[in-house]
Image (cartoon, grey):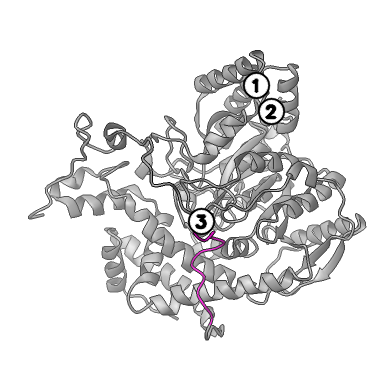
Amino acid sequence: MSALTIADVERIAALAHLDLTADEKTQFARQLAEILDYAQQLQTVDTDGVAATAHLHTDAGTERDDAPRPSLTPQQAVANAPDAAVESGLFRVPRVMGG
Amino acid sequence: MAALTARAIRDDVAAGRVSAVEVCRDAIARIEASNPSLNSFLLVDAEGALERARKVDARRAAGETPGPLAGVPIAIKDNLCVRGMKTTAASKILATYVPPYDATVIERLEAAGVVIVGKTNCDEFAMGSSNENSAFGPVHNPWALSRTPGGSSGGSAAAVAAAQVPLALGSDTGGSIRQPASFCGVVGLKPTYGRVSRYGLLAFASSLDQIGPIARTVEDAALTLTAMAGPDRADATSSHESLPDLAAALTGDVKGLRVGVPRTFVTEGVDAGVKAAFDAALAVLQESGATLVDVELPHAPYGVPAYYLVCTAEASSNLARYDGVKYGYRSPASADGLQAMYTHSRSEGFGAEVKRRIMLGTYVLSAGYYDAFYLKAQQVRTLLRRDYDRAFAHADVIATPTSPIPPFGLGEKADDPLQMYLADIFTVSANLAGLPAISVPGGFVTRDGARLPVGFQLTGRPFDEATVLRAADAYQRVTVWPTVAPGELR
């Protein structure tokens, strides 16, 4: 049985930019361990020298003309952003330094 | 009229026997009547739909050739972008998002004459097999309201089964079109990976995701695929492989067709009623002249673990974009600085299953676990593809049940993610191998006095949707299982 500690869960959550409640940490520690334990059965498969499949049926050498095309305006692009400065077409975020 | 097929509506609209506006009004009335009990639609755009229907009628009146789906009302899964129409992926984090552009499939289907009536409920970011992960409440199965319609495209399948609309779009990453189609007694097609552009589909797992139709007939699914397939400069993974004439492929003739049956795979854990329906479906194909052949898919039992490692890894990367900056929800706690804004917005905006999958995906991609989990899963994916290559040397299609179990009760598996994942055993392989697969209505089982649909799945060679559709259509022609749930339930 794979053991997953609360500290493991906190480390993964930090990597994923998630802040979990104490209940979520306990629940995920148990559920993720259970799922990973189940996934351990893959270790019984002999994959020596087998290439990994990352993607499928991609046509080689698909190219497009390097020509400008119509696209969203800056105003359209930021229209869904919370607290955007839409008129100037800018995203707005909290202070970055010293946070 | 929404109980008619898309093909029948198209023919009537093209011949002027009915207007697109009349068809549209009928669909909206049906949706308004049954949506309170089904929760299949998250958004109904009645005014916009009537306006679009008027344009279809105007084009016909002006002498233009009506499109192949002229006047057909269609529902769109809420993870597909429709310009100006709120698109939430059933997530709180996108509750207010209004796309500034159309998905490629939307552009193509509108050019073919469809009338978009609204957006359908689904599991949050298409992550789930029961529709219970929607931030806006679960969808109810039209055949038995206490049961799940399946997921993640549960709203789309329920909408078609309840005759709210004749046609809907779903997306399928590990069975999300086929399993709800099976649970709701309708047809669901996942095309070959690359057959349909994914541009404008909110990404879950980019190497597995594919958009496809949910309909009541195989013919309608073929019509819809024809209208939306083909290369797209906006999606580098869309294929240039040509699509044969699918209408011509639906001959009803399966004489000599070799149907592969992976008998050792379709044994353990399969509900007895589902197994009986599956055996009966095979017998129907055999009586129609097809030959049943035994095939082996030795790595298929590893499909579920491989799938849940690959899809969560890709999801953890794809969902990194939801950070409170560019669109969607931003936490009020963002005054504490940029990092706090990211973390609080994501933690408050995502639901439990999405967080669980992001956590799992982050774990399997993290240092020390990448080789043992992620790389291993991708290698098993290669072995599974080879299994299919070998099987397709002897068989033209491969038959399995779509789901090992009939539609289960809402809440029944909600607290046990692993049990929920295990029920995806027959659908995930087609995504891992990128193959076309269809779920066609394949009979019924009775549970607690309710008649519940069971799906029959056929999987084909890459880009050979034509054979998959031909076999499914031939089966549907001789079985005609009802595809509209009894109305008194609503």
Q: Is residue A27 magenta?
A: no
**Which residue is found at the position 42% from the left and 73% from the top?**
A33
Looking at the image, tell me whether mark 3 or mark 2 is earlier in sequence order. Answer: 2
State the quadrant of the C terminus of chain B: top right
The one nearer the camera, B396 or B179, is B396
Identify which residue is drawn at 52% across, 54% down. B209
Q: Residue B51 in the image: state x and y as whole percent.
A: 53, 18
Task: Tell me the kind of residue under disc 2.
Answer: Ala
Q: Secondary structure at mark 2?
A: loop
Q: Residues within 10 Å of mark 2 (few under 14, many from 20)?
A: many
Note whether A20 is above or below A10 in the view shown.
Answer: above
Q: CA distance from mark 3 to mark 1?
A: 35 Å
On the question of residue B365 being in view, the answer is yes
As helix, strand or loop, the secondary structure at mark 1 comes to: helix
The residue identified by callout 1 is B26
Q: Which residue is mark 3?
A: B414
* Marks 3 and 2 on same chain: yes
